[in-house]
């Protein structure tokens, strides 16, 4: 999954906080009000995205060892199935005492 939405919302939140802080210190009342009203929803969305990404990271790290074990078991089973059985000596279709019907050239 892409982390682009988290980075984008985090950047907006930090930018809005800096704008709100600057506008409060510079006595820009309307700008402080607008940025102050939009800051809490941005902070909530940022926290929500951070929690979702942390949960996905935790879930994927919990699945990795099980997937590795399954992969190893699958590879071992495949290697066992590819092994050739021990070769047995060739058996003759003609009895030992009877001459062969084929002539050697």
Image (cartoon, rainbow, N blue to C red):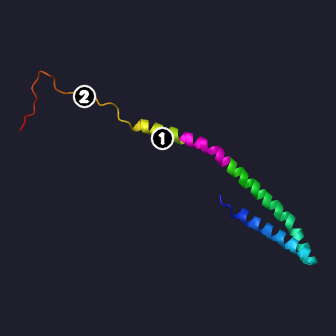
In reply to whether residue 62 is colored magenta, the answer given is: yes
Residue corresponding to mark 2: 89
Q: Quadrant of residue 5?
A: bottom right
Q: Spatial distance from mark 1 to mark 2, Cα to Cα?
A: 30 Å
Residue 65: mark: none
Q: Does the magenta stretch mainly form a helix, a strand or a loop?
A: helix
Residue farthest to the left, as pictured: 105
SS at circle 1: helix
Q: Nearer the viewer, residue 97 or 48?
A: 48
* Residue drawn at point x = 69 percent, y = 48 percent: 58
Q: Which mark is residue 75?
A: 1
Above or below residue 10? Residue 98 is above
Q: Is residue 66 magenta?
A: yes
Which segment is the magenta one?
Answer: 59-70
In contact (CB < 8 Å): disc 1 and disc 2: no
Residue 62, compared with residue 93, is above or below; it is below
Looking at the image, the residue that sits furthest to the top is 97
* Quadrant of the image containing the C terminus: top left
Determine the residue positioned at 72% across, 52% down. 54
């Amino acid at each position: 999954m892409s982390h682009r939405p988290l980075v984008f919302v985090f950047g907006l939140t930090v930018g809005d906080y800096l704008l709100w802080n600057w506008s409060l210190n510079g006595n820009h009342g309307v700008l402080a009000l607008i940025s102050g009203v939009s800051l809490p929803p941005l902070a909530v969305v940022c926290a929500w995205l951070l929690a979702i990404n942390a949960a996905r990271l935790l879930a994927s790290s919990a699945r990795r060892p099980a997937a590795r074990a399954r992969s190893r078991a699958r590879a071992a089973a495949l290697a066992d199935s590819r092994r050739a059985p021990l070769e047995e000596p060739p058996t003759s279709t003609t009895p030992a005492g009877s001459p062969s019907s084929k002539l050697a050239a």
